[in-house]
Amino acid sequence: MAGATMAAYLGRNGKKVAVIEKNWSEQDRIVGELLQPGGVQKLRDMDLGFLLEDLDAQPVTGYALFLNGENFEIAYPKEGESTVKGFGFRNGKFVQKIRDYIRTLPNIHAVDGTVTGFHETDGNITGVVYRPAGSETEEVLNAPLTIVCEGPFSNLREKLSDSEKQVSGYFLGLVLKNCNLPYPNHGHVVIAEPSPFLLYPITSTETRVLIDFPGDLPPKKGPELRRYLNEVVGPQVPDSVKPSYFEAVEEGRFKVMPNHRLPAIPVFRKGAVLVGDSLNMRHPLTGGGMTVAFTDIHHLGKRLIEADSADSNSVDEAIRRFYRTRHESTSTINILADALYGVMRNHDLRDACYDYLRRGGHYAAEPISILSAISRDQKLLRNHFFAVAFYGARNMVRPFPSPKKLGRSYRMIRDAVHIIDPLFRYEHPDRLTRSALKMSKVIF
């Protein structure tokens, strides 16, 4: 998705682009299906908003949270008189829509082949070595810039990044047919035991459910998994969803994907740049992956369009500025995704978060503006994150403090600090945030 979108943005703005892809057929994936409003806006900023048309994409106007039999909704922010919208869709159909578009551009060259490595000259990257489909012979394709966007399992990343990929667990995906969501056109977060699951529409007749499986190993398909889905997850599914859910479990078309975390620690190499999941990944709980990718594509693409492709120094400066400043627009998305997953895995913090958001007003409106990527304000995220922890800690000791309550309250704030500290560290926090986190670690 990132590669096709980058080609579309550069190609429609006059750049000559070769796109090398080993499989041009439509894929059935469970990643990249929910695009937040901030990502929709980035597509429109690149004049690519039309790519969301004719997909049976479903508008998403907010979120609903479920916990212990209770639930409430939070609407996305307003834009004038209307609520901003995200979209749910089939990943494969969206990618094919982008591919179909770039094939119409005369300056895009679509190549059917597999990249095997970089082509280097005097220590600089000058293109790629690839094997055309159906051939045993490798060929070289030279270009002033190679944009690496191979996704989570990139083979070229290690030469352009000092970051180590981590797996925090797995999502098991099911497609529910003709499902009656409690809140139509909403994302649903069910804070379940032992871990959360998500529901959101992807077509007019299909709903995606993603069930979290923490740990190092993916769930094994078989009778034991079906029993778990029916007997553990099933009772916690909203009542209106249960008929479609149990039918999907019975059908058994399970797909599993690892949930990655990859902080962006790029290494500058002349002639190449990382984009998309090859560069940066966060937990998919908040659906921020495509928004980060489109933000980076707009950020880098705009500079490359302005640069002189024949001037290597001009291209290098565009890449350096992209690496140096990208966090200003993506840090809140990355921090919130992994922080919220940490909160959902902590019983006291998740309860505090649910109660905090249920208060409504700015307690809900400002956090949802960050989740939707309409706001990219890192300070706002920091303030609300700690407000949740202190709100929960305060309520825990009411109405009469006791040593046991005080200890539990202290541990809640300590856990919050330990969740958020490493996430901010990789996202260029401001001086005040660094000082606050340093002080908090001393205290907690």
Image: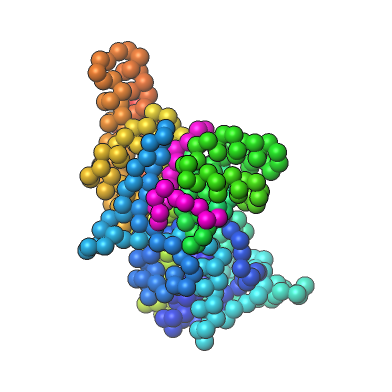
Q: Is residue 283 above or below residue 272?
A: above
User: Where the C terminus falls, by quadrant?
Assistant: top left
Q: Position of residue 192 (x, y in %)?
A: 48, 36
Q: How is the image coloured?
A: rainbow
* Viewer-nearest residue: 9 or 97: 97
Q: Is residue 141 above or below residue 2?
A: below
Tell me where residue 415 sits by quadrant.
Answer: top left
The answer to whether residue 104 shows anywhere in this view is: yes
The answer to whether residue 304 shows anywhere in this view is: no
Magenta-drawn stretch contains 193: yes
Magenta-drawn stretch contains 257: no
Tell me where residue 68 sits by quadrant.
Answer: top left
Q: Position of residue 422 (x, y in %)?
A: 42, 40
Q: Is residue 100 above or below residue 65?
A: below
Specify start and end residues of the magenta stretch as a single range. Answer: 177-195
Report the residue that reaches farthest toward the bottom.
Answer: 106
